Image: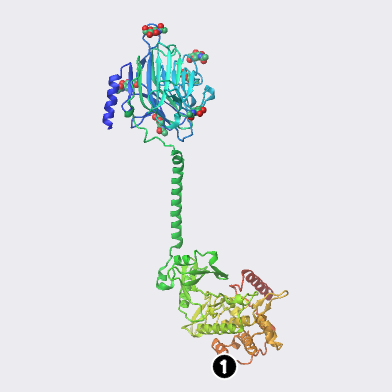
């Protein structure tokens, strides 16, 4: 039905029947009620007695007084009223206070209280016969104060809230059977109030809107209302809210004096459907907002996560880096390859950073990613340039440096992955698998040829600076490959290497390197010599003893001095080696680790000796005492960067003993 027709019909109904004898409202769209408090008329014509403000009252009265008495004997006329209402609680089982149909001396009950007083009375006037208020309460709250029978009843109130008579909500079928009704069901229900002025009989009847007016009323009370109802009275509704917000709606209302109230046109009443809550609404009213909140939260979190991840993985590329094109890896790729630098992918931790295993996303190539923290920002450009140069080195005994990635001060170096790990695993600490002599010789030859390539075979001289067993990696065929160019330095052929602060690992540092701070090919040869002894003896270059540390070079030297160099051979080999070869390697190791750089062979010579192309000269330490072999403690070098031979703990011990010897040497 269109709004206009509804309007006309309502207007017509009001006009034709709106004399003092009665009125009918089939919806309140065009009604001229006097409202106060929180009562309002909704846009679709419902009389809403209360809104969502708690502890408030709402009143709606017919604007003109009704004449109840004009009879000479002073008794009041019969009257009849009917209305359709609905009570909607916020949640199915929660009950606010109810509302009442009232006949009162003024429209609006001044001074009345909300909550359990239903907007009708207050503490002082409740029950006082001077009130002149007749009410029919639809009570949904159990107030012991007013002797309520339950929280779902209808009661007749005369001047006070303690009902004269009340009954649980429900209706009788014509056969006398009683049906319970729940006032807060949200369903529309109809109430009839009939007063017979002759018999002084009040009848209250309740029924759902789909049930005809029951013949048997719910409440039936003989009571003369003449002392209560004055000659001219206002009729209307009084409602209130407590802290539980319950909505009270009146859909239609009809009233008549001296005759039965005109029946309401139920089909024309405004619809509750758009605001009626279904039984499942409890889930929806609580659940839905929570779900929406949850979803929104999840969305926000995932957006934050995506942004943070994006920012985290974003490339920080400087102009000068663009020329390195293919050598520069994307951080995102390395992050994915190493599964976010997960601990499970950690291959090892060295003095210069952690090494992770990874698989490149697109090519599926296995790589090892080394994270180096590079403290100074300025040297970065030169550092990267060197990395790139080194990246161009290609030799089958070098671990190929595939490229790099730079992030702020963090440097990621990407190497070929070496499935068999580093050599030191097979030499010390009671290894599960050790290498036999043949394999060791092959590794030695491989490393020698790799080092020769670095020193002489390339356009520039490359000083490795950190040759040691833990930097020798084994490929799938157990070929030794020189890895870890984190410390490597380049200089042009025929020029002098720059003096830098001393880097390397204790036990592998040539004496003159410590003195001058200059790394040369010769200092690499020294470290290579120590490495040879390591492989042949299966011992660390510095072994911590009870009294003092045993220096491997000194110890082998003393064995040789005693004429029993084979005593130094690795017991794990169980004498399964060619004695001449073992002796040869040990002597070559001593020769390379000679304290005087001029006495050391070049890598070219070393390789020739190893290949048997050149006979090795007799080892001669003429004029050098065993003690002179010990690391002479240099004076006046300031910075000493070290990588640790195996574990950090040991590195500290070495550092500590170095500092100690520095102090004692200074005195
Ligand atoms: C309730 O109605 C009163 C009176 O009309 C009004 O002042 C108040 O803002 C309303 N509250 C809500 C929540 O609608
Ligand atoms: C509405 O009611 C008020 C009294 O509450 C009255 O003054 C006014 O004239 C009425 N308006 C109409 C259109 O009936
Ligand atoms: C109670 O209501 C009456 C009018 O109905 C009023 O005169 C009186 O002041 C009210 N009392 C309080 C305490 O509000
Ligand atoms: C009832 O109210 C009247 C006037 O408001 C007052 O004079 C009277 O004392 C009250 N009676 C009781 C019992 O409170
Ligand atoms: C009606 O409600 C009363 C209590 O309010 C209960 O004892 C009775 O069993 C109910 N009857 C039906 C048919 O639900
Ligand atoms: C008062 O008069 C009316 C109409 O004459 C009558 O119906 C009613 O019974 C009378 N009431 C009393 C109490 O006499």
Q: Is residue 119 at all visible to an observer of this figure?
A: no
Quadrant for the C terminus in the image: bottom right
Q: Secondary structure at mark 1?
A: loop
Camera-side residue of 290 and 542 = 290
Identify the colour scheme used.
Answer: rainbow
528, above or below 133, in the image: below
Q: Which quadrant holds residue 257?
A: top left
Quadrant for the N terminus in the image: top left
Relative placement, left or right, of 121 versus 422 is left
Question: For the residue with label 1, is its CB less than 8 Å from the closest atom of ligand 1?
Answer: no
Q: Is residue 366 at all visible to an observer of this figure?
A: yes
Give the percent coordinates (x, y) of residue 92: 46, 35
* Residue that mark 1 sits on: 614
Give the percent coordinates (x, y) of residue 161: 49, 21
Q: Which quadrant holds residue 229?
A: top left
Residue lying at the far right of the rendered structure:
547
- Report the number of numbered marks: 1
Quarter containing ligand 2?
A: top left
Residue lying at the far top of the rendered structure:
72
Give the percent coordinates (x, y) of residue 447: 55, 82
Camera-side residue of 42 and 71 = 71
Camera-side residue of 563 and 372 = 563
Give the percent coordinates (x, y) of residue 230: 41, 13
* Crowd around label 1: few <14 · some 14–19 · many ≥20 (10 Å): few
331, above or below 434, in the image: above
Relative placement, left or right, of 613 versus 558 is left
Q: Which quadrant holds residue 592?
A: bottom right
């Amino acid at each position: 039905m269109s709004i206009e027709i509804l309007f006309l019909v309502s207007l017509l109904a009001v006009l034709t029947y709106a004399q003092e004898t009665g009125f009918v409202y089939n919806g309140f769209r065009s009604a001229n009620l006097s409202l106060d408090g929180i009562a309002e008329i909704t846009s679709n014509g419902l009389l809403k007695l209360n809104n969502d403000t708690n502890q408030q009252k709402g009143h709606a009265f017919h604007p003109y007084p009704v004449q109840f008495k004009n009879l000479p004997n002073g008794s009041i006329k019969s009257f009849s009223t009917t209305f359709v209402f609905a009570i909607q609680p916020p949640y199915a089982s929660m009950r606010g206070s109810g509302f009442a149909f009232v006949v009162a001396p003024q429209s609006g009950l001044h001074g009345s209280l909300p909550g359990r007083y239903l907007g009708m009375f207050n503490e002082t006037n409740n029950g006082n016969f001077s009130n002149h208020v007749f009410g029919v309460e639809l009570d949904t709250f159990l107030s012991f104060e007013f002797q309520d029978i339950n929280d779902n009843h209808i009661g007749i109130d005369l001047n006070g809230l303690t009902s004269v008579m009340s009954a649980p909500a429900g209706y009788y079928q014509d056969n006398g059977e009683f049906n319970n009704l729940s006032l807060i069901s949200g369903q529309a229900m109809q109430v009839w109030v009939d007063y017979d002025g002759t018999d002084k009989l009040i009848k209250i009847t309740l029924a759902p809107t789909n049930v005809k007016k029951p013949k048997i009323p719910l409440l039936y009370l003989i009571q003369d209302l003449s002392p209560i109802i004055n000659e001219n009275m206002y009729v209307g509704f009084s409602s209130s809210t407590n802290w539980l917000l319950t909505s009270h709606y009146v859909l239609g209302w009809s009233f008549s004096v001296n005759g039965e109230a005109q029946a309401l046109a139920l089909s024309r009443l405004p619809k509750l459907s758009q605001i009626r809550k279904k039984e499942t609404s409890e889930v929806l009213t609580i659940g839905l907002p929570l779900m929406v909140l949850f979803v929104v939260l999840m969305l926000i979190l995932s957006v934050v996560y995506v942004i943070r991840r994006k920012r985290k993985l974003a490339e920080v590329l400087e102009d000068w880096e663009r020329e390195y094109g293919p050598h520069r890896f994307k951080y995102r790729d390395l992050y994915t390859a190493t599964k976010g630098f997960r601990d499970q992918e950690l291959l090892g931790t060295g003095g210069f950073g952690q090494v992770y295993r990874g698989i490149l996303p697109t090519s599926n190539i296995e790589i090892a990613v080394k994270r180096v923290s590079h403290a100074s920002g300025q040297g970065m450009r030169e550092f990267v340039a060197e990395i790139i140069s080194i990246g161009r080195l290609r030799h089958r005994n070098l671990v190929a440096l595939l490229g790099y990635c730079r992030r702020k001060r963090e440097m990621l170096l990407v190497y070929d992955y070496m499935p068999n790990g580093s050599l030191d695993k097979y030499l010390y600490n009671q290894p599960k698998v050790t290498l036999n002599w043949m394999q060791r010789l092959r590794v030695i030859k491989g490393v020698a040829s790799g080092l020769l390539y670095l020193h002489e075979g390339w356009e520039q001289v490359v000083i490795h600076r950190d040759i040691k067993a833990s930097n020798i990696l084994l490929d799938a065929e157990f070929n030794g490959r020189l890895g870890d160019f984190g410390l490597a330095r380049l200089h042009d052929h025929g020029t002098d290497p720059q003096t830098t602060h001393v880097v390397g690992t204790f036990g592998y540092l040539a004496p003159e390197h410590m003195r001058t701070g200059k790394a040369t090919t010769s200092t690499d040869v020294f470290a290579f010599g120590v490495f040879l002894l390591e492989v042949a003896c299966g011992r660390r270059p510095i072994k911590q003893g009870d009294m003092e540390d045993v220096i491997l070079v000194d110890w082998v030297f003393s064995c040789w001095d005693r004429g029993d160099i084979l005593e130094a051979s690795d017991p794990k080999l169980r004498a399964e080696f060619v004695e001449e070869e073992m002796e040869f390697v040990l002597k070559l190791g001593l020769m390379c680790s000679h304290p005087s750089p001029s006495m050391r062979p070049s890598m070219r010579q070393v390789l020739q000796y190893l290949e048997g192309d050149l006979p090795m000269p007799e080892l001669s330490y003429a004029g050098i005492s065993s003690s002179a072999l010990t690391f002479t403690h240099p004076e006046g070098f300031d910075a000493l960067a070290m990588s640790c031979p195996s574990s950090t703990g040991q590195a500290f011990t070495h550092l500590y003993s170095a500092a100690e010897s520095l102090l004692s040497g200074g005195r």
